[in-house]
Image: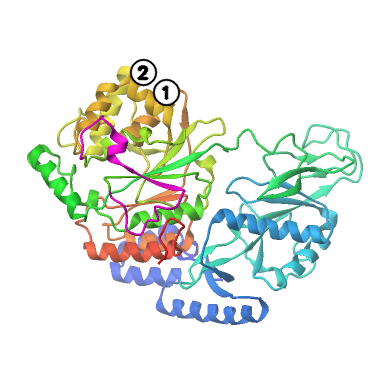
């Protein structure tokens, strides 16, 4: 098996070679070590072609072969993809196969946008594998050992040898690929986890794992889960949960609603602008002339802030693919609608600035700080919502618990970047001046100072907290809403002030998120995106245009479209039919 350059060569030796070799030579060496040369690519294509031909003879229906996270796997082509649907389908495959074989099983967990976990008694291991192999004989179903410290390799279920699968837990899954492009969409991360639970042969007066006596016949979990360590022996039927629309035998807990589960409505709000729209450009030019260009910071209205490279289309695809639990989407615009957007879709509502601002602020506005200060006025918005710029994307299946606690608290994601110590000045970048203004306001309100900026990730927001801030700081909110372009006096409400304020009011806590931020104008971004496409190992990522001077705009467009169309290749339900 090919080893990556990083694993094969110690880091200190890589750094020493990197300092000595010219850049072109280092790039060649790196491509050889990571398997990215033309020879490697041709060899991989040949292997995939052979695998696809072999699978076609063994599988009913269309089948292809893909490279996914370092593995060559048989895959089923699809023209629609949602992680939630795939999670449900993989769980149904396992549960239905066990039921047809008359085997006892229990649903251990079935979280929203999380892998379903099913338990079978260790004594039924052989019978369970026989049932599953029979069910998957003409399907491209794979299994992979679930192990926290080892990725392992995936095996076709139909090729499983009796007695070879003897570990405590496995993920069973179908690999899906986009019809047409052949891009891989998912693998073991969306599989159903099958666990084999030990059944006690005699009574245990004081079980060390549960702290309570267990009778013979009790089931003991092989791994930790959020519910139980053991299921006591009992007569009668187990509890039943509604799992993806089907009643399944499950753990005998009092209710399947866990205290830590997030099951309240969560909406998403986007802001979007089409900077190429002539009517919008005229409105901007007129407002700009009225304000006076000399009064504005150079970053208050630079063109990159208003460029639309179709990012919203792909961001909505990422939402449908990986965050299907979102209830409703609101798109806030200056009376603009993307031509590809299906406004008849009942899950999306376009909100104009006029409706958002009402009699507050000053329109037209070209100030994102002003628009963001009014988001809690979106009609019908849920109490908990996420705010996304159109250059934010979900990178893999995410659960609502990433953004909120089960008791309603919001999560925030602080950056290691700090605010400057100086007073707000006209030449501060707007993100810095907004942060400083937030800090000054919080010092007056709480006698506490804040120091950090926040990651470029979706903002978890509480509508009532935003309303409370506007009521408490009416002059500052009104001033921000009244600035048509970014102003040194603005607050940055939803991307920073809300998080600080909610924390100090006991309404938010620090969360953890795996994310990537990339400036598409940086020369090294193309390689970073290629690596991300291969690994798909971040919860969210942001492709920001910080300064368009680094890379030619046409090259930026080509790179961005190539990457996004491969990462999110299938149209979403938010798009009009071709």
Secondary structure of residue under mark 1: helix
Give the magenta-colored segment's residue range: 336-364
> Which residue is at a point 59% across and 46% down the rendered structure image?
112
- In terms of image quadrants, where is residue 264? top right
- Does residue 155 lie above or below 290 as drawn? below
- The percent coordinates of residue 150 (x first, y second) are 61, 57
- The percent coordinates of residue 368 (x first, y second) are 27, 40
Instruction: Tell me the quarter of the image containing the N terminus.
Output: bottom right
Q: Is residue 502 visible?
A: yes
Where is mark 2, residue-wise? 446
Does 42 sit left or right of 156 as displayed?
left
User: Quick check: is 138 in the magenta stretch?
Assistant: no
Does 234 sit left or right of 161 as displayed?
right
Asked whether 13 or 408 is in front, the reply is 408
- The percent coordinates of residue 102 (x first, y second) are 84, 58
> Which residue is at a point 25% across and 50% down the rendered structure image?
546
Q: Are marks 1 and 2 in contact (CB under 8 Å)?
A: yes
Report the disc number at residue 504. Answer: 1
Instruction: Tell me the quarter of the image containing the C terminus.
Output: bottom left
Which numbered disc, 1 or 2, marks the residue that appears first in the sequence? 2
- How many callouts does the rendering have? 2
Q: Within 10 Å of the Cα at label 1, are there few (<14), some (14-19), or many (20+) other Cα atoms? A: some
Does 111 sit left or right of 195 as displayed?
left
């Amino acid at each position: 098996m090919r080893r990556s350059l990083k694993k094969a060569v110690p880091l200190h030796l890589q750094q020493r070679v990197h300092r000595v070799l010219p850049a072109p030579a280092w790039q060649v060496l790196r491509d050889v070590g990571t398997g990215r040369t033309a020879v490697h690519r041709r060899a991989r294509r040949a292997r995939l072609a052979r695998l696809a031909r072999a699978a076609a003879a063994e599988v009913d229906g269309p089948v292809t072969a893909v490279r996914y996270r370092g593995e060559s796997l048989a895959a089923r082509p699809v023209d629609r993809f949602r992680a939630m649907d795939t999670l449900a389908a993989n769980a149904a495959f396992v549960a239905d196969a066990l039921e047809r074989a008359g085997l006892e099983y229990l649903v251990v967990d079935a979280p929203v946008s999380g892998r379903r976990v099913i338990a079978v008694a260790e004594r039924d291991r052989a019978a369970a594998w026989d049932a599953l192999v029979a069910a998957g004989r003409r399907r491209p179903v794979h299994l992979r050992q679930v192990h926290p410290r080892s990725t392992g390799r995936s095996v076709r279920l139909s090729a499983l040898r009796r007695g070879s699968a003897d570990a405590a837990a496995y993920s069973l899954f179908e690999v899906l690929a986009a019809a047409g492009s052949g891009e891989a969409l998912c693998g073991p991360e969306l599989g159903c986890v099958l666990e084999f639970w030990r059944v006690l042969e005699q009574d245990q007066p004081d079980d060390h794992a549960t702290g309570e006596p267990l009778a013979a016949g009790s089931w003991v979990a092989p791994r930790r889960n959020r519910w139980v360590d053991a299921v006591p022996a009992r007569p009668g039927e187990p509890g039943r949960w509604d799992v993806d629309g089907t009643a399944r035998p499950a753990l005998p807990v009092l209710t399947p609603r866990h205290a830590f589960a997030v099951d309240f409505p969560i909406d998403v709000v986007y802001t979007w602008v089409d900077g190429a729209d002539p009517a919008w450009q005229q409105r901007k030019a007129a407002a700009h002339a009225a304000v006076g260009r000399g009064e504005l910071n150079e970053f208050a209205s630079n063109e990159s802030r208003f460029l639309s490279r179709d990012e919203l289309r792909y961001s909505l695809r990422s939402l449908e693919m990986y965050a299907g639990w979102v209830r409703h989407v609101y798109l806030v615009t200056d009376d603009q609608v993307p031509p590809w957007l299906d406004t008849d879709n009942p899950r999306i509502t376009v909100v104009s600035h006029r409706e958002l601002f009402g009699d507050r602020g000053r329109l037209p506005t070209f100030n994102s700080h002003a628009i963001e200060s009014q988001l809690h006025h979106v009609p019908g918005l849920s109490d908990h919502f996420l705010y996304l710029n159109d250059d934010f994307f979900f990178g893999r299946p995410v659960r609502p618990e990433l953004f909120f606690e089960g008791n309603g608290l919001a999560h925030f994601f602080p950056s290691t970047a700090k605010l400057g110590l100086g007073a707000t000045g006209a030449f501060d970048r707007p993100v810095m001046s907004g942060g400083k203004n937030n800090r000054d306001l919080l010092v007056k309100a709480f006698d506490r100072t804040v120091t950090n900026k926040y990651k470029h990730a979706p903002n978890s927001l509480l509508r009532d907290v935003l309303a409370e801030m506007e009521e408490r700081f009416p002059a500052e909110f009104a001033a921000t809403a009244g600035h048509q372009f970014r102003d040194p006096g603005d607050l940055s409400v939803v991307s920073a002030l809300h998080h600080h304020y909610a924390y100090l009011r006991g309404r938010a806590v620090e969360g953890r998120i795996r994310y990537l931020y990339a400036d598409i104008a940086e020369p090294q971004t193309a390689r970073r995106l290629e690596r991300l496409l291969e690994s798909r190992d971040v919860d969210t990522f942001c492709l920001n245009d910080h300064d368009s001077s680094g890379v030619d705009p046409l090259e930026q467009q080509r790179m961005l479209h190539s990457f996004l169309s491969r990462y999110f290749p299938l149209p979403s339900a938010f798009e009009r039919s071709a």
